[in-house]
Image (tube, rainbow, N blue to C red):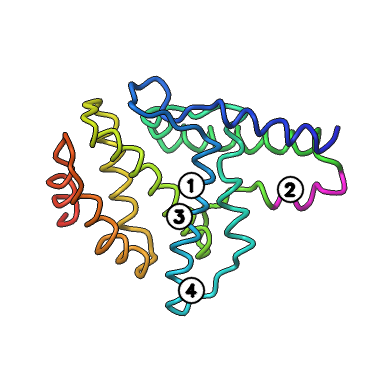
Amino acid sequence: MGIHKFFMSMNDLERIIRAPGRFKFEEHNVAAHSWKVSQYAMFFATIEENNGATINWKSLYEKTINHDFAEIFIGDIKTPVKHASPELKQMLSHVEEKMMENFIKNEIPEEFHTVFFDRMKEGKDETIEGRLLELADKLDQVYEAFAELQRGNTDVEFLKMYENALRKIFHIPLPKSIAYFKEVMLQDMIAEKSVIDVKALTLKLLIE
């Protein structure tokens, strides 16, 4: 038992490919996803802080960096399967949680158990940091799907991913961040050339 096992397990995150089983022009792994999520969250946290919010930066970074670590146990399950029913999603979350608990008990030195149990728990909650994690996680789905649609990938799953992630982003209770995303970032995205008409799709979602 030792922290060595924890550090070695990070290599597994580099080998877990997101959206498995679909044709993609560009592959993305879970380790890179976690880093990108931390960058997105840092930016939007800055927007919130500049508008008067108090950000717990330590909590934000811990939530974003660790939010998908448990995927080393069950991988990245296909989105349609994961969201097939609330019951199934809850069961998968329970399995991840229990396997994470066992991993900490068996592989992390005992003197660090308390901090790791707190650090590795589900980060998407009602705190501003949890909401920023939710926004950042969904934003990476938007970018991954957008890149595939832009290149002409006609796999319907990327169309669904783009639509569903945008819809969820629009309803996250972070008004300043969501306004910036809609009014600045999204406008830049749809101004880019795309094989599939992402602009028309996006404008339709904006007026729903």
Quarter-of-image position of residue 141? top left
Q: Provide the secondary structure element on which disc 4 rests.
A: helix
Q: Quadrant of the C terminus?
A: bottom left
Task: Specify the amino acid type for callout 4.
Answer: Glu
**What residue is pinned by disc 2?**
116
Which label sits in the foreground, 1 or 2?
1
**What residue is pinned by disc 1?**
36
Residue, x 54% and y 75% (percent of image)? 54
Q: CA distance from mark 4 to mark 2?
A: 27 Å
Q: Earlier in the sequence, mark 4 or mark 1?
A: 1
Q: CA distance from mark 3 to mark 4?
A: 14 Å
- Tell me residue 63's x, y (percent): 59, 53
Q: Is residue 49 magenta?
A: no
Residue, x 30% and y 66% (percent of image)? 179
Quarter-of-image position of residue 162? top left
The numbered mark at residue 208 is: none
Work out whether 99 lies above or below 125. above
Verify CB contact (< 8 Å) between mark 2 and mark 3: no
Q: Provide the secondary structure element on which disc 2 rests.
A: helix
**What residue is pinned by disc 3?**
40
Q: Earlier in the sequence, mark 3 or mark 4?
A: 3
Which label sits in the foreground, 4 or 1?
1
The magenta region covers: 110-118
Residue, x 24% and y 55% (percent of image)? 188
Verify CB contact (< 8 Å) between mark 3 and mark 1: yes
Q: Provide the secondary structure element on which disc 1 rests.
A: helix
**What residue is pinned by disc 4?**
49
Q: Earlier in the sequence, mark 2 or mark 3?
A: 3
Q: CA distance from mark 1 to mark 2?
A: 22 Å
Q: Nearer the viewer, residue 116 or 92?
A: 116
Q: Could you classify mark 1 by the number of other residues whose Cα lies within 10 Å: few (under 14), some (14-19), or many (20 or more)?
A: some
Q: Earlier in the sequence, mark 1 or mark 2?
A: 1
